[in-house]
Amino acid sequence: MNEHNPIAQLVLKIQQAWMDKVANKPTFKFVRVLIRPEESRVYEGFCKLESTANGRLPEVFVTQLTAFTDTDTFSGALITDWLAEYDKSSSIITQAAFKWDAQPYRNSVLNDELLLKMLASFRHALSRDLVLALIPREVSNTLHLKKWISNLLKKGIPDGVKIMLIDHVGNEQFTIADKQFPGMICNLHVPMDLSNAIQKLAGQGDPNNPEIMLRKCVFEMGNALKDKDVKRLHKWGQQALDCTQRSGNKGLFATAHIMYAGLLFHFKREPQIPQLLEKGLRIAKQGMLQKDPACLPLVIQFYGYQAAYAQIRRRFSEAIPLYMQQAEFAEQQNLPTSALNAWYQAAELCRRKDAGRHYDVLERGYKAGAHLSDDEISASLYIYILRDYYEYAFANKLSTIIEDIDVKMHRLFGPEWKADVDKVRKTRAPMLLPTEISNTNN
């Protein structure tokens, strides 16, 4: 870790606070880390670092991103994800002469008791204390997750094992009274000036380097946006365009356009937005012809931004073809995840605004994901495309398609897959477009 990096210094500050307050405190079983939302990436970096041989703390961290659905299934989902990650790392673990028998946890009833036994067994094999750091991708119900933590505390978290969970300052969801579990709970908060660290990071290096100059411009545009100062935002946006154009780097020049336009989305009537997106897309396509690797993902993003801009201006007949164009381009470039995200956006917009095209678009999304592996399906929006297309196939008695979808989803989610997918979709955070972050009008 580069300790001269301002962000790395914040991670070092977290490590020191952990050493002072948490490490070598065997009675602590649940560590609630209080952060501000914008600090989440710093804490993810801290957890990832402590999950490697470069960690500084006496405990070994195992970080799990498992989504929380309900109290009855979370422990089982953690065990399943844990074993999958363990199997992926088996060759490295063998080389490190680490011996742990995972077999007893593969064909057992997945419940809280088995999770606790697995953690105790893994900790024993490590011969070091263990921290299970939970950063769920999604949480369906915070009260139920809090109840899950309390249940584990009642059942007895093993010696040498701590469970860590992130909570938010000012919007605390996982407060557990210490008198319920005396001496077992630790609340950790590390004050940090993230804005200052980012500003320092943006200014590091050669001030004449166009990448450094672009970083500074983006930081200043962000400050102008916070102050709702459109004139200042335009000033720094133009500087970003000027310095990257001089560099001759198509990828950097196109990046300046999409960042500038993206920040202007908060002022959705700004006439420069479509101009920036059109010009940036041309530049990115030119960069692709010159084999600039940064330009391919930028072209996909520009199509998405153009579609999103049309959508917030309520030009739905323009937005749908643009999402479809984004999907088709991503398919041509063999980028299935990007393609499926765009097909799903197009299908959802059709469902709400152009019902006559809905199932045609869904069908194209269904065909686009037909080659995906089980892991790719379960980790993508394709599960929602399958769920919606199943209803169409069922209504139209398309037995081959019904069977194909049913076999796939039954294998991934079990016999109640339709209800499970509906529940996940209902509780997951909505896909925010850049334009939907703020309702500010110019």
Image (cartoon, rainbow, N blue to C red):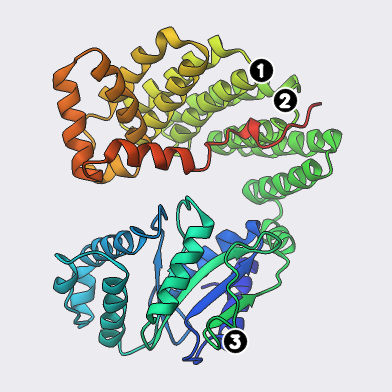
Instruction: Name the side, left or right, on which 158 lies relative to 203.
Output: left
Instruction: Name the side, left or right, on which 39 lies relative to 152.
Output: right
Q: Which residue is mark 3?
A: 21
Give the amino acid type for the residue marked by disc 1 in the picture: Arg
Q: Quadrant of the C terminus?
A: top right
Give the amino acid type for the residue marked by disc 3 in the picture: Lys
Q: For label 3, count other residues whose C-alpha is less than 10 Å away and answer few (under 14), some (14-19) or many (20+).
A: few
Q: Which residue is mark 2?
A: 268
Give the amino acid type for the residue marked by disc 2 in the picture: Lys
Q: Is residue 321 above or below residue 69?
A: above
Instruction: Name which residue lies at 43% across and 78% down.
Output: 154
Where residue 30 sits: x, y (%)? 50, 77
* Nearer to the camera, 352 or 207: 352
Q: Which residue is mark 1?
A: 313
Instruction: Name which residue lies at 61% across and 82% down.
Output: 17
Q: Is residue 186 above or below residue 195?
A: below
Number of numbered discs visible in the structure rendering: 3
- The answer to whether mark 2 and mark 1 are in CB contact below 8 A is yes
User: CA separation, marks 2 and 3?
Assistant: 47 Å
* Nearer to the camera, 350 or 194: 350
Q: Secondary structure at mark 3?
A: helix
Instruction: Name which residue lies at 27% across and 76% down.
Output: 118
